[in-house]
Amino acid sequence: MSTIEQLNEKMESLQQMEDGSSLKTLRHEAFSEFRKNGVPTTRHEEWKYTRLGGIMNKDYNFSLDRHSISKEDFDAYRLPGYEEANELVFINGFYSGEMSKIISEELVVMPLERAAAGEYENIITTYLGHSRNYLVDGINAMNTALMHDGVFVFCKKNADTKHPVYIYNIQDARSSNVFSQPRSLIYVSQNAKMQIVETYITIGQSESFTNQVMEVVTMQDARIEYYKIQKDHVQTNAVSTTHIIQQERGFAHAVTISMDGGIVRNNLNFIMCADHGESHMYGLYFLQCNTHADNHTIVDNIRPNCLSNQLYKGILSGHSTGVFNGKIFVRQAAQKTNAYQSNKNILMSDTATVNAKPQLEIFADDVKCSHGCTVGHLDDEGLFYLQSRGIPETKARALLIHAFAMDILEQIYLDPIRKYIDQEISERLENE
Amino acid sequence: MLSIKNLHAGIEGNEILKGINLDVKAGEIHAIMGPNGSGKSTLASVLAGRPEYEVTEGSVTFLGKDLLELSPEKRAGEGLFLGFQYPVEIAGLSTINFIKTAVNEVRKYRGEEPLDSVSFLKMMKEKMALMNMDKALLNRALNEGFSGGEKKRNEVFQMAMLEPKLSILDETDSGLDIDAIRIVANGVNKIKKEDHAVLVVTHYQRLLDFIVPDFVHVLYKGRIVKSGGKELALELEERGYDFIKNEYEVEATA
């Protein structure tokens, strides 16, 4: 049976599951969407540069569950600063309460199914699946249609959450290819603060494909920082969606660091559905070998007086490919919108590629929007300046690349994570 | 220390230097003057090893070594320093990290141990005092948002930290007001030691009021057409470059 047939069969069987009406309805609708749209091909405008066909044609072991990874296995992969962090663990796409650790009293964490059937039903009904309005393709629908063992995180009103939340998406590829579909909804209540770090880990040398969807709601005056770290090995592919819905004066700050992997596609959406929201998104893709990293961002300005700022930087060597597609909508009511976008790339080899595409759709007349894109090589004048001070060429190059990455690194406000990424970048530069 | 013989060099096939001869000995200060486009900055760039310039003829020896064979970083290791006319701004690289790396790379080249943090800071404090440098500048990104004066002061500060044998100052006075020139020149004078030679490349005489040269050379159309003592600079200031041009053209047509 092909992978698509197996997925269809799984979706079909999940239709029968009784776990709260909202989940059931969503799954049902997503299943028909999936059947209608299928897995996107490069003919789909939003998937022009990223080909999923090869991934979908592989065979995967769909019988892997949340128990295949032990605590000892996991220990080797924990991120720096974990001692002081809440840790949520997905194994093969299923939330594992057993492996997770919640130390903040301000957080309520439970399986999505339970949240949908209990006091959080309203939140689930309102926000879960919101991303499908923006990602009209079979891949988003596939995650929703297969939604099962996801997690719901509720951050209480006025909470000043001191401990960040680390989210690990772990795949067990030790004996066979693994296909995982983590799902989560994070609700940050009024005036609450929260920091999230998310990472992807494939254990074993077989292939993995992770199709993950996280939806986040920041309520009035809430503040969220979100850091995504992609450093998985070359046999791993991922479509990773983070969809953030912002209410009045919501503040969101996202940094996406992509350093390794096979094919990596990130969807980062900011839906500014109320006045005075503020969003910042930063990205660094530092790629080598054949890694393909595609960053698609959407900022939807629905209401007036919102600010968004995005800066994505790429450093590409080997045969790597970077894609940046930044879409900004400014709806008719969204007067006084400020929306800025910038994408800068350095090509380190003749065989690396960058595809950059800004898309601005503006329907209001009193707005400030800008976008810019550069693709170039390392600055010769800077290189000569450093060399003329006695710094050997290879080291001078490393210093300049590190300097280029610095304004993204500086946006990681969590010290242990920033130091860790900084160290990883330095190590790669030393080995080049 | 430095011996330039019949140096021809250019960029993208255009010959700019057409046979330069110059000898600089330890402890001497030489000034290279000349009108715009005469090849002053090209000479400075070729000596420091700027890659876009091509040497087509002639030789340069520096402390007994064939300078033209060495990469820019090795030239720095051997003790050559170029103060840039336009110091480069590098966002994301702190001045202090840059200088520490440079100092230790040069020490490594010279077979010396790298400085530990304590000795480095001590050395830095001394040289900063010498240059009247504001400590805040060191924690900022290299030259980013520095004023013209701050950039040039930073150049001379780097020179102090790297302890070169020959310093080439390329139009260090350009874009500076008289106070800034005085500060920079004082810095150079304080650093200057017995065995340290300086090549000052400048369009105007005013820097030479503060850094007094032993020799002045006038560069015109890629050649040194006149050499003299410090009084030559004063003469140029008074009469302008035209008299050099006229003399040269007369000679050339005679």
Image: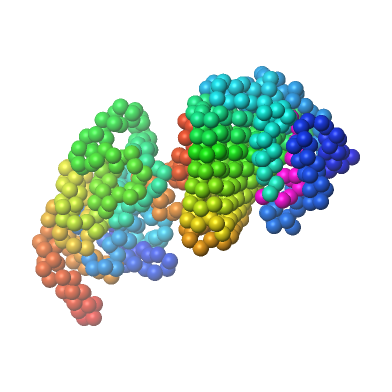
Magenta stretch bounds:
A134-149
**Colour scheme shown:** rainbow
Which quadrant of the figure has residue A243?
A: top right
Instruction: Establish if A170 lies above or below A292.
Output: above
Query: Residue A95 vs residue A58: left or right?
Result: left
Residue pushed farthest right? A1
Query: Residue A380 vs residue B107: left or right?
Result: right
Q: Can residue B187 be seen? A: yes
Q: Out of A57 and A346, give the one closest to the viewer.
A: A57
Instruction: Establish if A199 lies above or below B46.
Output: above
Query: Residue A353 vs residue A93: left or right?
Result: left
Q: Can residue A319 be seen? A: no
Q: Out of A66 and B113, give the one closest to the viewer.
A: A66
Q: Which residue corresponds to the image point at 13% horizontal and 52% vertical from the top-left?
A: B210
Instruction: Establish if A89 lies above or below A185.
Output: above
Residue B32 is situated, as x and y percent measured from the top left of the image, at: 22, 60
Which quadrant of the figure has residue A257?
A: top right
Question: Which quarter of the figure is the C terminus of chain B placed in?
Answer: bottom left
Q: Which residue corresponds to the image point at 60% horizontal and 42% vertical from the top-left?
A: A244
Query: Residue A160 vs residue B210: left or right?
Result: right
